[in-house]
Image (cartoon, rainbow, N blue to C red):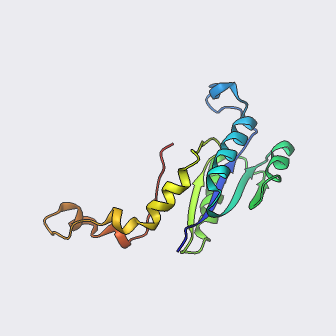
Amino acid sequence: MPVKYNILLRACDKVESVHKIKRPFALTKAQTIKVSFFSMYQALQGEKYKFRIIGDDLSQGLLDFFQLFENVTVDNENLGSAAKSLQKQIDLALMVPNDEWVYMCEDDYLHASYSFKYISEFIENKEQYLQTSGKQKNYLNRIIGDLSRDPLIIHTPD
């Protein structure tokens, strides 16, 4: 069965930098969001997906930008903090059907064009990749058993 993704992207362009550090290539926060979003959008082409932006008081420029793309829904509220937008992201993730995959990320993650091809291949073949040996003397097996049929969380590096 093909993998179906529910992309939950948190975005806020009000704060230029929490740590007062310049962004790579001297991009503004809005430019960073656009580049990051577009890299992920491109990487999702050929996959089954729904894209939901969890906006925290996004500017009209970003709202207009997101309207240019198919399969993208924007929930824009004045959440006021990263903690509140994260809570909303988790709440939305918990409502996704069990046979679909949730992909949670923030507005400054770049994705290579092949990212979701690799992730999908891993998910489709997870039993092969996660199968542990059946030997009871294997310490990992005694603690967690066979991972190949258990629910899975994939945490791609930031």
* Residue 7 in picture, x, y percent from top left: 63, 59
Q: What is the quadrant of residue 26 in the picture?
A: top right
Q: What is the quadrant of residue 128 in the picture?
A: bottom left
Q: Residue furthest left?
A: 137
Residue 20 in view of the camera: no
Tell me: 63 left or right of 123: right
Question: Residue at horizontal 75%, vertical 40%?
Answer: 13
Q: Between 58 and 81, which is closer to the camera in this rendering? A: 58
Tell me: 11 left or right of 47: right
Tell me: 55 left or right of 121: right
Q: Residue furthest front?
A: 46
Residue 131 in view of the camera: yes
Question: Residue at horizontal 71%, vertical 55%?
Answer: 53
* Residue 150 in picture, x, y percent from top left: 39, 71
* Residue 75 in picture, x, y percent from top left: 76, 58
| In the rendered image, the vertical position of residue 116 relative to residue 148, given as above or below | above
Numbered circles on residues, count: 0
| In the rendered image, the vertical position of residue 109 relative to residue 71, given as above or below | above
Q: Between 97 and 133, which is closer to the camera in this rendering? A: 133
